[in-house]
Image: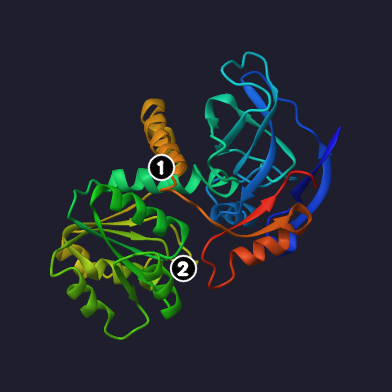
Amino acid sequence: MTMRAVVIEQFGEPKNVLGVGDRPVPEPGAGEVRIAADLAPIHNHDLAIIRGVYGYRPALPAIPGTEAVGRIDALGEGVTGFEVGQRVAVSGVQGAWAEYFVAKAGGLVPVPDSVSDATASQLLAMPLSALMLLEDLQVSAGQWITVNAANGAVGRLLNLFARERGVRVLNLVRSPAAVKALEELGFDAVLDTETPDWQQRAAQLTGGDPIVRAVDQVGGPASNDLLSLLGERGELISFGALSGKPMVINPGPMIFKQAVVKGFWGSKRAEEIGGDERRRLIGELVGLAARGVLDLAVESTYPIQDAAQAAIATEAPGRNAKVALALSGQ
């Protein structure tokens, strides 16, 4: 039996290397299940994998995709606690951009039908990373953190989780439209870093209180902008590099503020925190989703044969929600 799948034969720009082909339907091994996929979001790290610049490279040819929601189609040997037809979400997999893929049973998260496909398909990778990140920041209610590219998925999630904990967030974006979009969502402190007086306005918004942590998703000169906002002994965390440029850091402020600069890789942290802690955090995410507090939109959905166009749309300016691939019934 064959299935339709997105395939790359070589690494490169997604618009150039993403294709669609027929592949054998995978069989689940011991401890695995096969999932009939419904919806899969396109993450920045998916595109980095396709370009061959992520933390690992899959063997080629490869089926991309690391997160999806679907229903269990078959159980591998030794799998208990799940049943065929059960709705589940999963992340950290390979080959999710296909009608069927296999995943380890231990990584499955049952999802109630009250949670939409849009939310369920994105429930783990970015939300779990954002929640782990916030916990790693070790901030208390009333303290200030800041994040750039705040109109992206991680920025919005970080705000949601921070609000639940009483942590205050200074949100940095790069256009008036992004400011308006976040303010319409109820974000309190939003600044356009393209305006000349934004750093002075930052001090006004925080009331002079120190910013204890800064999350950098952009890299390049934007890293130094965050460093300039940090208080003494603050921490600058590199979460991404949307600019594609190395971090630019002025050693003066870093030395005299005794600031710490470090990286955060969600996949590695998920391994390090252990099963019990991971289950606790995922339980919080599922609970927030079931209550409607965590509601993750999909801006546009593309059929599997239009994966290249979907990748282009993912990186188009002005996007306010995820782009996803519809995988069932193709």
Q: Identify the residue shown where x is 13% and y is 69%.
A: 208
> On the rendered structure, is 93 left or right of 200?
right
Q: Residue 166: where, in percent of width, then height?
A: 23, 51
Q: Is residue 138 above or below residue 33?
A: below
Is any part of residue 265 visible from this angle?
Answer: no
Q: Identify the residue shown where x is 43% and y is 35%.
A: 282
**Residue identifier under label 1:** 288
Q: Quadrant of residue 225?
A: bottom left
Q: Is residue 198 above or below residue 83?
A: below
| Label 1 Cα neighbours within 10 Å, binned few <14 / some 14-19 / many ≥20 | some
Q: Tell me the number on the disc at residue 250.
A: none
Q: Earlier in the sequence, mark 2 or mark 1?
A: 2
Camera-side residue of 290 and 136: 290
Mark 2: amino acid: Lys
3D distance between C-alphas at marks 2 and 1: 35 Å
- The quarter of the picture where the N terminus appears is top right
Mark 1: amino acid: Leu
Q: Tell me the number on the disc at residue 245.
A: 2
> On the rendered structure, is 195 left or right of 89?
left
Is any part of residue 86 visible from this angle?
Answer: yes
- Outermost residue, bottom direction? 196
Q: Residue 36: where, in percent of width, then height?
A: 71, 35
> On the rendered structure, is 184 left or right of 53?
left
In terms of secondary structure, where does tag 2 sit? loop
